Image (cartoon, rainbow, N blue to C red):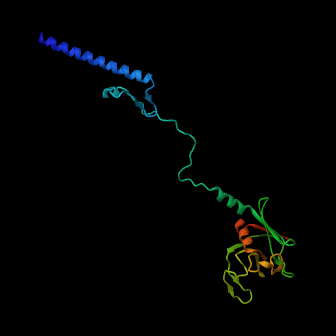
Amino acid sequence: MPVRLKDDSIARSMMLLCLGTAGMLALAQWQMRAGRFDVGSSQMLVPSHGERSLQSLVVINQSIQPPTNHEPQPAVNSTITPPEAKSETVAKTDSRVVVNLSERRVQVYQGSQLLDSYAIAVAKPGWETPTGTFHVLEMEQNPTWVHPITGIAVAPGNNNPLGAAWIGFLSNEAGEIGFHGTNQEELIGEAVSHGCLRMRNKDVKSLYSHIATGTPVIVEQ
């Protein structure tokens, strides 16, 4: 008889355990149906007095992830050229310079668009600038001028006849011809040079910024 009492006690304990487990499973299912499973956090919300064993009975799908943006993103190490750099490249490679000797003006174009127009001083009679199509051969800012007869060099500055910049487009046995600034801006518009085309210093710097070596130079009468 004592053995039976012990067996009966064990049987009742097992029954209570089964009933408790079934109750906890029912509670978990009720929570899921009531919308208390947070997909974003992948966790089951349980009352503050819930048993630890209740959480262990619920299998959380850890593979649930928030929606992703499938739009392609640039690679971290990819090289992206800024818009301003692209526009500068186009301006210098697609530009051309047109000189009108009779009007004493030079115009710079980007494609068909006129970017700017500048007044120039042209050559004196007997030293006329050749007409035709040439290309920029060399460019230099703040150049040093060398006197063609004495060979004396004049450093960049207010006394330099080449002014702020030199843009050469013709070179032969007679010498070099190009655009350059001047230390005598009051002579712009006159016929005073020995073949070169003089410009105001601010204008020659502006022209310099629009072109590059190889830019066509068209000289017209």
In the image, what residue occupies the spot 39% across and 29% down? 45
Q: Residue at x 70, y 73 (%)?
A: 138
Q: Is residue 28 left or right of residue 203?
A: left
User: Which residue appears farthest toward the bottom when viewing the image?
Assistant: 150
Foreground pick, 14 / 50: 50
Q: Quadrant of the C terminus?
A: bottom right
Q: What is the x, y in percent for residue 142? A: 67, 76
Q: Residue furthest front?
A: 48
Q: Report the number of discs.
A: 0
Question: Which quadrant of the figure has residue 37?
Answer: top left
Q: Residue at x 46, y 31 (%)?
A: 39
Residue 214 percent location from the top left of the image: 72, 67
**Picture coordinates of residue 16 (x, y %)?**
26, 17
Q: Quadrant of the N terminus?
A: top left
Q: Residue 187, relative to residue 51: is it above or below?
A: below
Above or below 92: residue 184: below
